[in-house]
Amino acid sequence: MAVSSSAVGNRLGEVIETSTTGFIAESDELHRLPDLGALVCVGGLDDSRAYYGVVAYGATGGLDTSRKAVRRGGDHLADAAIYSRHPELELILRTVFSVAVIGYRDGPGFRHVLPALPVPLHYSVHGCDQSTIASFCAAPRYLAALLNYNGEIMPEQIVAAHFRWIDNQLNDNHAWLADATRRLARLMKRDYDRLAIVLEAVAPD
Amino acid sequence: MTLDLSRVITQITDMVATVDPDHDRHRFDALRHLWETLDSNEVNSRLSNAKTSFLYASGSSDYRRVHALPALPDSFGVVATDGSMIVPDRHSPARYYLINTGTVHLRYGESPAAVMSATPDLRYAEDDLWVDTEARKLPVNDTILGLRRAVAELQAAAEALQSERLPSVAFVDGTLILWALESLDKPIVEPLLKSYVQALEAFTSLNQPVAGYISSPGATDLLGTLRVAICDYPDMGRTIDCNDCWKQLTEHGQIPHCEILPRVTDRYIVSQIAAIAPGQRTNVFPGRSKILARYGDDQWVEFFYLHTGREIARIEVPRWVARDPELLDRVHSVAFDQAQLGRGYPVALQEAHEQAVLSMADRRLVEETIERRLASHGVIVTHTGKDGSKRGRFV
């Protein structure tokens, strides 16, 4: 099942757990995963669909979760050299990332609501190209959903990471960032403390 | 029911109180003195006509010699295999066994790489489940299946090395000496022995050494040599004869002179008495089990002890490897390196075990798949009462 060409990007990984609110993917390459807050995409069961989500967590650990990592190095062996001395590590470790699903493409348009069905298991996760990012994120009505995402880290941090990432991708003199921040402020007008967390984390350079 | 430790703790305390570290001090002193003053020439002369009831290490000009750790090859390969089994279960309706062989192939040096796999082999034919002895047919038992598994492990290791150009070592977990065969009937022994020795010969053809790795070995070959050294029969002008000594004990209450030595394992002698250092190994000694005569000279199993840093391991190699200093050095250095990488036990063997191991869930999956397929063929299987009680444990 091909992913629509509007969301072409290198394959990042594969969906290994899925539910209505999001999915977990295993990276194709150990230690490599999309940035926190990045927009990613998964193809649908038919050509007209594609699902979009924001990366909300990442981890590297044993493929078999009952096996815990132990120290492998010391004074004489550290960092990348550990992987050369232990070639089996590439096969017994894996990197995974969690994605909060925030919308989908339905025909020509995008919808910023949870899809009716979870993302299909074992489908590829791709990065999104700039035009897709610009189109999907144009008027972000998914912020409320993202703020209520129940994951491993504070949703405020995910929103902040997402804002920084989009701002960086679009490189539009912070135009999108300004608009998104205003939307966020309206959403969080009764919760200034939470808003402050996001704003402080975003603070453009 | 889980164990209620509080009800056993008093007994444990009492038991520990009976252990007196000083009780056998004079015996350990005798052991240490004997080792330090060991005359290897005298030992060899005694061994030339000794009739012992135990195994011993032999054939060294200096039994106490210690060998330093050689350098690793620049680039080399390691293959390790391990097998896991589902054995025929009397309470299961299906008649089959399954051997799952895990294989790990690692490369070190210039281009590190790893390949891991597991291959299941399910057998159900009459010939697989029954063994023909002259008198009758016997169902395969755990011993026979264990030996078939050992053959499968060797075959998988040799196969992995087929395409390997780097100097390598193949490790299997456990001994290369088929002790278990000594107690089986000849018609059962023959085919098993033949396939095992053939599997060993594959490594000779590849010119890649295979080694059996035994963690915390219970062997007492060196102790046997020391018992020969301390025996008082030669002092009386007689050749060593344990049968005669046994008669003296049972008929006249004469305690054998070697009883002065404490009943310790070789690993104790090597680590505490000889006190070899991490990385060092002992001499290589030939195995003396009767079954080895059937292996032929090239595949005759020899062994040495290695200080892995964490413990004393026993490494067994075929004679053709022991005779080649380069190959022996390779087995020595790679075994030590593997044990460092694996924090006390060869990492390749650990991973081979992980590949091979079958969980309860795996076993149930095989059973259920078979039952579903049988059902689709119109054969409905029923479970025994005992099996049912284990599946559905109720309160």
Image: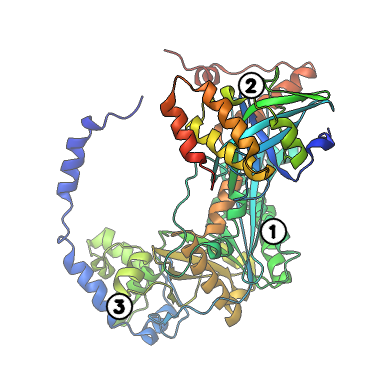
> Is B233 positioned to the left or the right of B384 in the image?
left
C-alpha distance separating marks 3 and 2: 72 Å
Residue B395 falls in image quadrant: top left
Task: Using the image, tell me which numbered label, if any, was put on residue B194.
Answer: 1
Q: Dots 3 and 2: beta carbons under 8 Å? A: no
Residue count near mark 2 (Cα–Cα under 10 Å), binned few <14, some 14–19, many ≥20: few
Task: Name the mark on residue B182.
Answer: none
Dot 2 falls on a residue whose secondary structure is loop
Q: Quadrant of the N terminus of chain A?
A: top right
Q: Is residue A55 left or right of residue A67?
A: right
Q: Which residue is mark 3?
A: B35
Q: In the image, which is nearer the foreground, mark 3 or mark 2? A: 2
Chain ID, mark 3: B
Of tags 1 and 3, the one toward the viewer is 3
The answer for which chain carries disc 1 is: B
Residue at image mark 2 = A20
Q: Position of residue B281 (x, y in %)?
A: 44, 75
Mark 2: amino acid: Thr
- Dividing the picture into quadrants, the one containing residue A37 is top right
Q: Secondary structure at mark 3?
A: helix
Disc 1 crowd rating (10 Å Cα; few below 14, some 14-19, many 20+) is: few
Q: Is residue A167 above or below residue B197?
A: above
Q: Are marks 1 and 3 in contact (CB under 8 Å)?
A: no
- The residue under label 3 is which amino acid type? Trp
